[in-house]
Amino acid sequence: MFKKKLTLKILLFLIFSDILETLTQLFFKKSALTQSQFFPAKITDILIFLKAVSASWFLWLGFLTVVLTFVIWSTILSKIDLSVAIPIASFSYILVPLISIIFLHEKISLIRWVGILFILAGVIFVSLSSKEKEAIG
Amino acid sequence: MKESLIFILFLIVLTSICDTINQLFLKSAINSLNASLTGNILKILRFILKLIIMPRVWIGFLFAVLSLCIWLFVLSKADLNFAFSADSMHYIFIALASRFVLKEKVGLKRWAGTIFIILGIILVSLS
């Protein structure tokens, strides 16, 4: 079997994949907003909606980030266990609030801080479990 | 009111399961390729090409699309805070599926970490 150690490089890849996923959401939302006046009456109206949305560049940017995310995520999964990759990808729950604090000067409630600390502790535990296994195997 | 809440919860479980199935198919496909990737871009591209011609990956992809459809429906009905906290249980499905289907060794530390993350997400979502 191949090695499954979680390295700093893979961790950075995971964070990058998180950022790409967030961008995907943002791009799809932006493209959908160009048609916010659109109200489908019947199911086939979805096709008309999709055609209208496809005129927006954001939709295509969104597809591009989907493909990129798939490439990076697959590369990550070729290196580490699924039960390690998925929990560590929860990093985005920390990234978004931290970015809001640093760049948007948002105030974060005490409960939210506790939540962030819990997630951080969880990510550290899962990372350690991956390293430990490598030492044994 | 209470019945609709149970229905939404059921849908959230369903979307979590679909998502887990997608990840399982993808990971099992990747495991079967047994690739040792280095920084080489060409090697990575060849790996991705081999991957996307596997039917398993496409079956997984279908589940991902299904999961997305259900999730969008949930978001249109439920409170966002509630939806995100309930969705955090998919970490349990992933851990169980990794343990029993993929035969990964999920030890005490990994379980503890996973449960910490779930609690953390619930706290972040609810506040």
Image (tube, coloured by chain):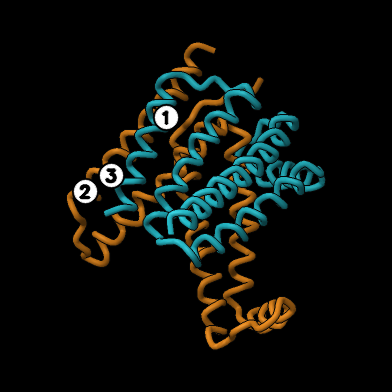
Chain colours: A orange, B cyan
Measure the C-alpha gap from mark 2 to mark 1: 23 Å
CA gap, disc 3 and disc 2:
6 Å
Closer to the observer: label 2 or label 1? 2
User: Camera-side residue: B95 or A90?
Assistant: B95
**In which quadrant will I find the C terminus of chain A?**
top right
Residue holding disc 3: A115
Q: Residue A4 in the image: x percent, y percent?
A: 56, 26
Q: Is mark 3 on a helix, strand or loop?
A: helix
Query: Badge 3 sits on which subunit?
Result: A
Q: What element carries label 2?
A: helix
Towards the viewer: B28 or B50: B28
Asked if labels 1 and 2 touch by Cβ distance under 8 angstroms, the answer is no
Q: Earlier in the sequence, mark 1 or mark 3?
A: 3
SS at badge 1? helix
Residue B23 falls left or right of residue A23: right
Identify which residue is drawn at 52% across, 80% down: A33
Q: What residue type is labelled 2?
A: Ile
Q: Residues within 10 Å of mark 3 (few under 14, many from 20)?
A: many
- Category of crowding for the residue at label 2, using alpha-carbon neighbours closer than 10 angstroms: few (below 14), some (14–19), many (at least 20): some
Pointer 1 local density, CA inside 10 Å: few below 14, some 14–19, many at least 20: many
**Which residue is found at the position 21% from the left and 48% from the top?**
A111
- Mark sitting on residue A111: 2
Q: What amino acid type is highlighted by mark number 1?
A: Val
Task: Output the chain of dot 1.
Answer: A
Q: Where is residue B85 in the image (x, y as percent from the top left)?
A: 40, 49
| Callout 3–callout 2 Cβ contact below 8 Å | yes
Total marks drawn?
A: 3
Q: Residue furthest top?
A: A136
User: Which circle's residue, 2 or 1, is located before the other in the chain?
Assistant: 2
Q: Is residue B75 left or right of residue A113?
A: right
Where does label 1 land, which residue?
Answer: A126
- Which of discs 1 and 3 lies nearer the camera? The answer is 3
